[in-house]
């Protein structure tokens, strides 16, 4: 029996200026699940994510968060209890690392002492250095450090749900690997429900419990990574999953041959 | 360094607290009002593109109105408002000086602040705006916590531009009666006191520079979040403001305000009246450089108490008369009209006329065989005439043209001080000169006869404001001036002020003192 679903889409569609970006999407994401949304550019991945915290409104169908129809929820309150990691990172350039991390707690009216304690806790959690980073401005940080701050900011108000829009896309491979593993650990340790957009099949396979493939506004596959790697009826999904599989096989041969 | 330059510098320095204080007060009030108007306007219009376009276009149009015209337009507007408010609410206010200057300058400061605020607010990276929404900010919080702080450097750059513009343009508030550093420039241009002109320009430039740097300090402090810098800049501005408001800087409340138009003779006569009042123990201040169209309204509205005007000017401009009558009749008619229609008292004539007259260099007139305006009509199509800024739009000029069929090759408007050298250099052939002008003799000009008596008489008369009508102390102080100045004395005085000479102090105050000595000498004879 699956656990209670924290996020659910029921026949959700979305049109922008007559253009159909999502069509008849139904999904149920369970508590503590780590879901990767995979697909080509323009498939509707970001729209799907934005519907969850009402940065966008569904044209039809119902989106529920923790059982509540988001249309009746207060969007501000909704956003404050859902962490969001932006593709562009989106740190506030005029605020220090500490102020960026503490922004949602500040909006929620936490007192200064509680915010400061939470900032220290999060700086440790995302493996930054309190002394070196706390009072820096975003432009003084490296790309990887910036996205660590972005993740810390998303986690600051102790959300149970974290949404991530290609969070590691702009990072160099080493940083990307380290940061994604760190986040997976945090996901497990904090008992989060995470939805991550990516267009990198390997990243999806290695990180997620479940992969949702979106193409042309429709969900064309929804399964565990192992199941998808084993082959799918849809030719696009097969093609998509071929890549990490082939890469893994070649790597294995290379390692075996070299040994 | 020669004595005259020394005297002029000392004179300029003595007026600095008054002029600089006025300048700072009017510019800062205008800038504050401009910011208070444009920032909210920018805020309401950033999400309304149609409104934004209208607001920017309107403030752009304001910017294209020449500063002097914008300032001058506010005077009649406010005069109307003041009368309306007096009538309906019983609250009157002075339409002269501070208020119109502040309003006009505030309008001037709108565009740079507004444009920069809109640019700054709409220029915030959409990814940052999205992040602000994503972390759960309301629209208001997005504005206050993200958009405004990020737009601040751009907004401050607009404020700095506005500050420099306003401080520069504030020099033009002199003709509507606001004391400013422009008083040096206007008075200096009229009396050929180049020390004054340069002093005024340099002081205004320096003030603009200081303010710009203080604002830059605030901007830098806010951007880099060095509170000390921002505080220092703020403190600097506060200090300048405070010193401008301090009692020592502002003019002590004088009982009487003496008006003067924008030419040398008026500066001298205002100084003479001030000295007479001072001798009688009456405190007075001068409001110099008032526009010819503003000054009578200002008197009727009690914004000034006394000034010298010319009967022909009022005859033509206020009574709209195109006929000419004998001197006594014109004075009588003008006097009764002023009393009935404006409540103004014509106290009496000073004893000379300052009429418009057409004049030519003597050799040139002789060569062309011109002795009267009637002779001039034949040669006019090959000649150029120069007049002051108002002459060619005055009814007398229209009457002259009609009566004699004058039709010149070209009409040139000039600062009166430059007409005479231009005639001497042969750049213009005919001048619309003034009969009391000292340089008519100096430049060997011949005044052409007016056989048809088209030009009305221009007796210099003392006019009193309605509230000064029954003021015996004022009347007693001014009485000795009536009929005491003949045209030769006025010419000599004007010549002293404009041409100076060895050992002559050309400042209006010194010339006025010299005049009084002459008047007393004649009386003793």
Image (cartoon, rainbow, N blue to C red):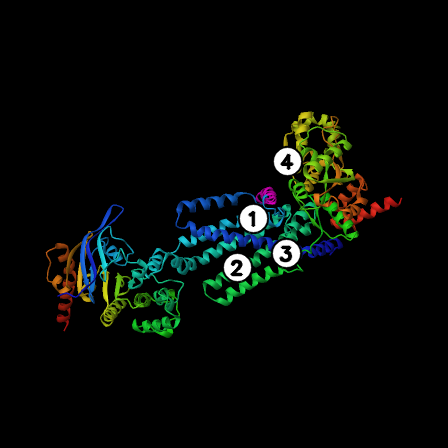
Dot 4: element: strand
Tags 4 and 1 in contact by the CB under 8 Å rule? no
Write down the residue under mark 2.
B215
Q: Nearer the viewer, residue A136 or B61?
A: B61
Mark 4 to mark 3: distance in Å?
Answer: 37 Å
For mark 1, name the chain.
B
Both labels 2 and 4 in a single chain: yes
Q: Which residues are magenta?
A: B69-87
| Quadrant of the drawing holding the N terminus of chain A | bottom left
Give the mark nearest the N terminus, 2 or 3: 3
Write down the residue under mark 3.
B21
10 Å neighbourhood of mark 3: few (<14), some, or many (≥20)?
A: many
Identify the residue at horizontal 39%, vertical 65% (top origin).
A95
Of marks 2 and 3, the one in the foreground? 3
Q: Which mark is residue B412?
A: 4
Q: Residue B71: say if magenta.
A: yes
Of marks 4 and 3, the one in the foreground? 3
Give the mark nearest the N terminus, 1 or 3: 3
For mark 3, name the chain.
B
Of marks 2 and 4, the one in the foreground? 2
For mark 4, name the chain.
B
Write down the residue under mark 1.
B103
| Quadrant of the drawing holding the C terminus of chain A | bottom left
Quadrant of the rendered structure where residue B263 is? top right
Tags 2 and 3 in contact by the CB under 8 Å rule? no
Q: Nearer the viewer, residue B441 or B209?
A: B209
């Amino acid at each position: 029996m699956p656990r209670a679903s924290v996020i659910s889409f029921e026949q959700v569609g979305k049109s922008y200026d007559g253009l159909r970006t999502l069509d008849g999407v139904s999904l149920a994401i369970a508590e503590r699940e780590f879901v990767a949304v995979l697909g080509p550019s323009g498939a509707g991945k970001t729209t799907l994510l934005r519907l969850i915290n009402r940065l966008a409104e569904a044209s039809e169908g119902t989106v529920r968060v923790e059982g509540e129809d988001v249309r009746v929820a207060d969007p501000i309150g909704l956003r404050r209890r859902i962490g969001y990691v932006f593709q562009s990172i989106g740190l506030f350039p005029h605020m220090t690392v500490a102020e960026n991390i503490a922004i949602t707690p500040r909006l929620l009216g936490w007192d200064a002492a509680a915010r400061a304690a939470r900032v220290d806790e999060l700086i440790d959690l995302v493996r930054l250095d309190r002394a070196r980073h706390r009072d820096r401005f975003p432009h003084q940080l490296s790309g990887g450090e910036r996205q660590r701050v972005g993740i810390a900011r998303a986690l600051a108000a102790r959300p149970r749900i974290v949404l991530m829009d290609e969070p590691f896309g702009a990072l160099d491979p080493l940083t990307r690997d380290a940061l994604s593993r760190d986040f997976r650990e945090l996901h497990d340790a904090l008992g989060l429900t995470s939805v991550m957009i990516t267009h990198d099949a390997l990243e999806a396979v290695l990180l997620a419990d479940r992969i949702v493939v979106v193409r042309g506004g429709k969900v064309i596959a929804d399964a565990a990574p192992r199941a998808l790697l084993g082959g799918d009826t849809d030719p696009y999904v097969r093609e998509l999953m071929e890549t990490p599989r082939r890469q893994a096989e070649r790597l294995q041969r290379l390692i075996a041959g070299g040994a | 360094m020669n004595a005259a330059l020394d005297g002029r510098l000392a004179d300029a320095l003595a007026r600095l607290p008054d002029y600089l204080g006025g300048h700072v007060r009017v510019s800062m009030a205008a800038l504050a009002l401009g910011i208070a108007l444009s920032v909210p306007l920018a805020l309401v219009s950033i999400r309304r593109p149609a409104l934004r376009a209208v607001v920017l276009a309107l403030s752009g149009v304001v910017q294209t109105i020449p500063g002097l015209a914008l300032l001058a337009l506010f005077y009649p507007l406010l005069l109307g408002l003041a009368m309306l408010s007096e009538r309906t609410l019983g609250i009157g206010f002075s339409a002269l000086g501070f208020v119109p200057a502040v309003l006009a300058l505030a309008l001037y400061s709108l565009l740079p602040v507004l444009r920069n605020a809109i640019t700054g607010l709409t220029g915030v990276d959409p990814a940052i705006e999205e992040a602000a929404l994503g972390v759960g900010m309301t629209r208001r919080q997005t504005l206050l916590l993200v958009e405004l702080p990020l737009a601040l450097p751009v907004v401050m750059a607009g404020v700095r531009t506005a500050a420099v513009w306003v401080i520069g343009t504030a020099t033009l508030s002199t003709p509507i009666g606001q004391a400013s550093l422009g008083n040096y420039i206007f008075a200096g241009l009229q009396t050929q006191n180049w020390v004054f002109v340069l002093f005024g320009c340099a002081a205004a430039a320096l003030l603009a520079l200081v303010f710009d740097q203080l604002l830059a300090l605030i901007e830098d402090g806010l951007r880099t979040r060095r509170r000390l810098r921002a505080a220092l800049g703020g403190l600097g501005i506060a200090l300048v403001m405070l010193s401008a408001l301090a009692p020592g800087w502002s003019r002590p409340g004088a009982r009487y305000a003496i008006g003067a138009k924008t030419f040398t003779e008026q500066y001298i006569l205002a100084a003479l009246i001030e000295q007479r009042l001072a001798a009688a123990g009456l405190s007075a201040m001068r409001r110099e450089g008032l526009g010819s169209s503003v000054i009578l309204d200002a008197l009727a509205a009690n914004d000034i108490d006394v000034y010298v005007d010319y009967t022909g000017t009022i005859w033509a401009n206020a009574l709209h008369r195109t006929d000419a009558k004998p001197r006594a009749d014109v004075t009588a008619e003008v006097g009764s009209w002023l009393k009935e229609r404006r409540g103004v008292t014509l106290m009496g004539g000073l004893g000379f006329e300052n009429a418009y007259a057409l004049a030519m260099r003597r050799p040139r007139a002789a060569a062309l065989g011109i002795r009267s305006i009637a002779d001039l009509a034949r040669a006019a199509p090959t000649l150029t005439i120069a007049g002051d800024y108002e002459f060619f739009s005055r009814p007398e000029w229209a009457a002259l043209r009609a009566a004699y069929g004058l039709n010149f090759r070209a009409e040139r408007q000039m600062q009166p001080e430059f007409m005479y050298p231009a005639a001497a250099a042969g750049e213009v052939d005919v001048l619309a000169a003034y009969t009391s002008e000292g340089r008519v003799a100096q430049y060997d000009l011949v005044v052409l006869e007016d056989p048809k008596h088209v030009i009305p008489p221009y007796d210099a008369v003392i006019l009193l404001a309605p509230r000064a009508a029954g003021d015996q102390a004022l009347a007693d102080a001014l009485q000795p001036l009536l009929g005491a100045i003949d045209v030769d004395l006025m010419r000599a005085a004007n010549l002293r002020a404009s041409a100076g000479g060895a050992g002559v102090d050309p400042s209006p105050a010194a010339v006025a003192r010299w005049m009084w000595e002459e008047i007393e000498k004649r009386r003793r004879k």
